[in-house]
Amino acid sequence: MTTYVAFLHGVNLGRSRRVAMPRLAALARELGHDDVWTWASSGNLVLSTGRPAEVVGRELADALLAEHGTTVGVTVRSVARLAGLLTADPLPEGPGQVTISFLAGPAPEGAEARIGAVATAAEPYAVAGSEVWVRWGDGQARSVLAAGLARVVGVGLTTRTVGTVAAIVSRATAS
């Protein structure tokens, strides 16, 4: 069995995209997953299963569509992979909050150049496989890059702070 984190994109950001975390956990159990729990109210679901990540994501997205009538992007990563990402942090020093954007697939060709064309000097970034790291030196509120990151990258994504990812990994790996 593998322990995964399913990151839901854009839930609880508007009236039509409300997903209660207890119901999300129940839905995962109904799909046959074990050791299910959620983190915060922003669509972070932890579960254990023998199924591959792609299947887990597709099943959850289908179940959410059936239950809520709206498409919810679901990006799944193993806890082991997340721990490795945290260890390999390409932006370990500097001011501002660091986020990891989990892409729905590999970064398309030219993604790094497109990010570079929009990012400011206060927004160092790194593209690593199917993740994009950004340090928001001046915050995200007025950032052109933050407002359109998925469009700039060219593939669906969902973003979490490094602190959120670290907290989830810590709890998931606690004995």
Image (cartoon, rainbow, N blue to C red):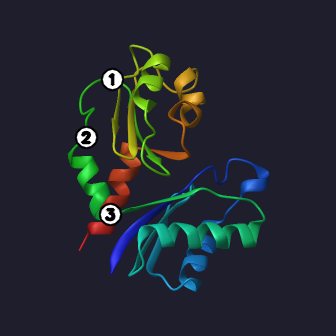
Residue at the spot x=26%, y=56% of the render? Answer: 83
Which mark, residue 95? 1
- Label 1, secondary structure: give it: loop
Q: Position of residue 57 (x, y in %)?
A: 52, 66
- Label 3, secondary structure: give it: helix
Q: Residue 119 lies in what quarter of the image?
A: top left
Q: Quadrant of the N terminus?
A: bottom left
Closer to the chain start, of discs 3 and 1, is 3
Taking depth in this image into account, of 153 and 168 the one nearest to the observer is 153
Q: Position of residue 19 (x, y in %)?
A: 67, 63
Closer to the chain start, of discs 2 and 1, is 2
**Which amino acid type is marked by label 3?**
Val
Residue at the spot x=64%, y=73% of the render? Answer: 23
Q: Residue 61 lies in what quarter of the image?
A: bottom right
Q: Residues within 10 Å of mark 3 (few under 14, many from 20)?
A: many
Image position of 10 (left or right of 110): right
Task: Verify CB contact (< 8 Å) between mark 3 and mark 2.
Answer: no
Mark 3–mark 2 Cα distance, whole angstroms, equals 15 Å
Vertical placement of residue 49 versus 89, above or below: below
Vertical placement of residue 128 versus 23, above or below: above
Q: Which residue is mark 3?
A: 79
Q: Which residue is mark 2?
A: 89
Q: Residues within 10 Å of mark 2 (few under 14, many from 20)?
A: some
